[in-house]
Amino acid sequence: MADGIAGPKTQAALQKADISERREAPEKPGWLVLAECELGVREGQGAANNPRVVQLFADAGFSGIKQDSVAWCAAAVGAMLKRARNKPSGSLAMRSYEAWGVGLKEPALVAVATKKRGNSSWQGHIGFVGGANASRIFLMSGNQGDAWSVAAFPPQGVHRLPLASRRADAGPAHAADDDLRGALGRERSIVQRVGREGGTSRLAGR
């Protein structure tokens, strides 16, 4: 995994890995379920644009963008949140999510994670935390190697969850307050604990 992108063997290992405590895993929130369905989708060849990537911009609220060569990791996160009836940041700047939703003190499975790039005040990367081991978290995101993929990153960064809605018409894909709070209560310390114990934790694709 020299480039940080989880290849087939790494992703297979994540699928088989058990969390360090044997217990029932929480239900995955809608945005993570939807993101899993996008894995493997990649930009078009050459000057071609993959309509499935372009649709992410439209679903995130930026229908004027028609090229998949535009950085699309924030569009990917925004589209998944919106499809799951959660409110995204409303920006294509990935670090706009640093002030969005509810902040977490530590990495948590299913959270939105932002990563800084160097000393830039705006450049970076964003994705959903889908797993972790002793030294890394695994982000499920778009625009990783020009595709939706799972990639490893250091655990440091900003981790947040959407403000849950109490709308009666939110539908089954949306994580309601109590469900999201319960899932987070069971899972929020897994990444930190696994780091101490040297195990592997995963939620994506369980």
Image (spheres, rainbow, N blue to C red):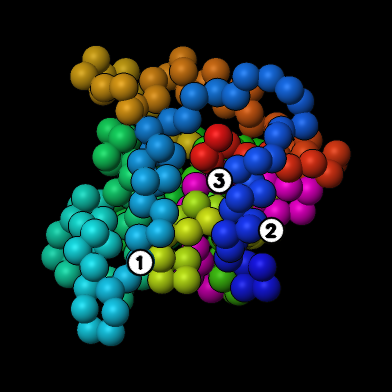
Q: Earlier in the sequence, mark 1 or mark 3?
A: 1
Tell me the number on the disc at residue 129: 3
Residue 32 percent across, percent down from the top left: 43, 39
Would you say residue 96 is visible in this rendering?
Answer: no
Circle 3 residues within 10 Å: few <14, some 14–19, many ≥20? many
Looking at this view, is 104 or 57 the one in front? 57
Q: Earlier in the sequence, mark 2 or mark 3?
A: 3
Residue that label 2 marks: 154
Q: Quadrant of residue 44?
A: bottom left
Tell me the number on the disc at residue 42: 1
Looking at this view, is 162 or 195 the one in front? 195
Q: Quadrant of residue 195?
A: top right
Q: Amino acid at mark 3?
A: Val
Query: Which region is colored magenta?
Result: 120-137
| The furthest residue to the bottom | 46
Q: Amino acid at mark 2?
A: Pro
Say left or right for 137 vs 150. Answer: right
Q: Residue at x 32, y 18 (%)?
A: 166
Tell me the number on the disc at residue 75: none
Q: Residue at x 56, y 44 (%)?
A: 130
Looking at this view, is 24 or 190 the one in front? 24
Q: Quadrant of the N terminus?
A: bottom right
Q: Quadrant of residue 52?
A: bottom left
From the viewer's perspective, is residue 167 above or below residue 113?
above
Which structural element holds mark 1? loop
Q: Earlier in the sequence, mark 1 or mark 2?
A: 1
Q: Amino acid at mark 1?
A: Arg
| The furthest residue to the right | 197
Q: Residue at x 55, y 18 (%)?
A: 182
Circle 1 residues within 10 Å: few <14, some 14–19, many ≥20? many
Residue 4 percent across, percent down from the top left: 62, 67
